[in-house]
């Protein structure tokens, strides 16, 4: 590392080799008229400017690129455009275009942090990436949407006791609220407010709200008590005596509640477990199936784009319309008007 430089945020390095050192950043400017703690505060805010998951992704992708460069005796920082183009061309043999683009983003961020021009903006890299997209296609591989009948079947397949009650609460709230799995496991008991109209969830932070502005999501009462998300959440809170802290928690084999919250992977495991028990192909279902299922089922029932977006929190109409098109494939199909 160049003398006088420092690393702000997690180091983007492999720990070995010339390109594996932590990415050097220009020293912070000397501001004698400002209080001395300011540089440390600046560093903290810079670290907080990106989500932890994003930083971890950059670290992993940067290590992968550095390892590739080390094996070919080329310099990763600054990286030659030809080397980056060759790298992503090789990645196309085993990665999807979206994953390759993420690696390009990590390379660009590393160069930006070091005050260097990024090779990812050059013509050779851009054209290589464009060719990869045209050759491989860009349609995302999505998990199946869990529709209302699927949810009912999954609820019927839950265990008895505390685990079953928690799983029913998790599935029904995830489906009714169209929550991401990270949003579900991030909820605390204090975020739930019950009223005669239903349950109001205070969503403090989400994937598209990294600054924590927050929003409120309404969960109405269901017509069937067995699948009513509001009654089920109430029953879970009362049975588990969860008055504060994580709403959804681990339960040991003796049925005792643990203090720690569930993880996003735990949500996927619960969905897959119940899908399998319900006779569905569990390989096609995961945590996102609840959110996708809400949007698709709502579209099938004729809900408007606006109402779906209010519940899902989508900012892009294009993203929501993917679900609406899927839900309207047969409901608004011109082929049904052909008289065949």
Image (cartoon, rainbow, N blue to C red):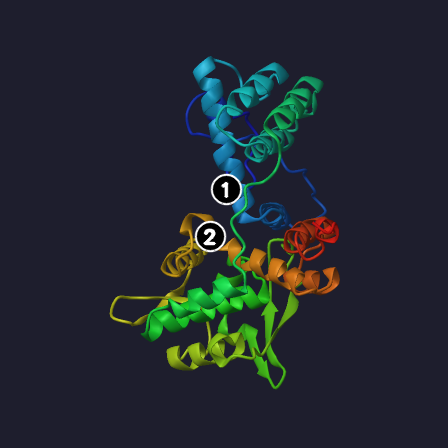
Q: Nearer the viewer, residue 203 or 289?
A: 289
Q: Residue furthest left?
A: 254
Point 52% across, 74% down: residue: 229
Residue closer to the observer: 283 or 11? 283
Q: Nearer the viewer, residue 261 or 161?
A: 161
Q: Nearer the viewer, mark 2 or mark 1?
A: 2
Q: Position of residue 60 (x, y in %)?
A: 48, 35
Count neighbours of disc 2 (C-alpha within 10 A) and say few if under 14, some if 14 to 19, many if 20 or more.
many
- 83 above or below 177? above
Name the disc covering residue 185, or none.
none
Q: Report whether residue 187 is seen.
A: no
Residue 294: percent from left, percent from top? 59, 62
**Secondary structure under badge 1?**
helix
Compared with 245, 322 (above or below) is above
Dot placed on the residue nearer the N-terminal end, 2 or 1: 1
Local crowd size for mark 1, using a 10 Å CA cut-off: few (<14), some (14–19), many (≥20): some
User: Mark 2 = which residue?
Assistant: 285
Left or right of 105? Residue 174 is: left
Q: Which residue does the image show at 60% across and 62% down from the upper left?
A: 297
Which residue shows up at 58% across the image and 79% down it?
221
* Residue 250 in picture, x, y percent from top left: 36, 65
Q: CA distance from mark 2 to mark 1?
A: 25 Å
> To which residue does mark 1 refer?
56
Whether residue 33 sits left or right of residue 271 in the image: it is: right
Q: Determine whether, in the image, residue 173 is placed left or right of residue 166.
A: right
- Seen as rendered, the residue at the extreme bottom is 196
> Which type of secondary structure does the marked residue at label 2 adopt?
loop
- Residue at 60%, 66% in the rendered image: 203
47 versus 243 height, above or below: above
Instruction: Point out residue 108 in the picture as x, y percentages from the top left corner.
Output: 63, 30
């Amino acid at each position: 590392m160049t003398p006088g430089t420092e690393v702000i945020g997690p180091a983007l390095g492999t720990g070995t080799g010339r390109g594996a050192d932590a990415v050097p950043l220009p020293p912070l400017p000397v501001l004698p008229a400002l209080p001395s703690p300011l540089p440390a505060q600046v560093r903290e805010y810079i670290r907080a400017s990106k989500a932890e998951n994003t930083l971890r992704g950059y670290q992993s992708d940067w290590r992968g690129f550095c390892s590739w460069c080390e094996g070919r005796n080329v310099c990763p920082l600054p990286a030659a455009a030809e080397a980056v183009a060759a790298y992503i061309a090789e990645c196309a043999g085993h990665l999807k275009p979206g994953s390759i683009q993420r690696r390009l983003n990590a390379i660009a961020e590393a160069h930006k942090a070091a005050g260097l021009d990024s090779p990812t903006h050059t013509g050779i890299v851009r054209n290589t990436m464009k060719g990869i997209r045209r050759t491989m296609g860009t349609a995302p591989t999505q998990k199946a949407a869990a529709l209302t009948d699927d949810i009912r079947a999954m609820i019927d397949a839950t265990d008895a006791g505390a685990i079953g009650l928690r799983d029913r609460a998790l599935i029904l709230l995830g489906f009714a609220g169209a929550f991401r799995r990270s949003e579900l496991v991030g909820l605390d008991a204090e975020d739930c407010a019950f009223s005669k109209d239903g349950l109001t969830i205070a969503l403090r932070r989400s994937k598209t709200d990294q600054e924590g502005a927050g929003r409120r999501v309404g969960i109405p009462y269901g017509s069937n008590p067995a699948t009513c998300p509001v009654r089920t959440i109430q029953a879970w809170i009362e049975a588990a005596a969860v008055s504060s802290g994580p709403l959804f928690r681990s339960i040991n084999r003796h049925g005792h509640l643990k203090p720690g919250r569930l993880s996003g992977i735990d949500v996927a495991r619960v969905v897959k477990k119940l899908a399998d028990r319900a006779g569905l192909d569990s390989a096609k279902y995961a945590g996102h199936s609840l959110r996708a299922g809400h949007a698709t089922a709502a579209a099938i029932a004729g809900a408007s784009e606006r109402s779906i977006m209010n519940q899902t929190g989508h900012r892009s109409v294009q993203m929501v319309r993917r679900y609406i098109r899927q839900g309207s494939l047969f409901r608004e199909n011109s082929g049904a008007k052909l008289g065949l």
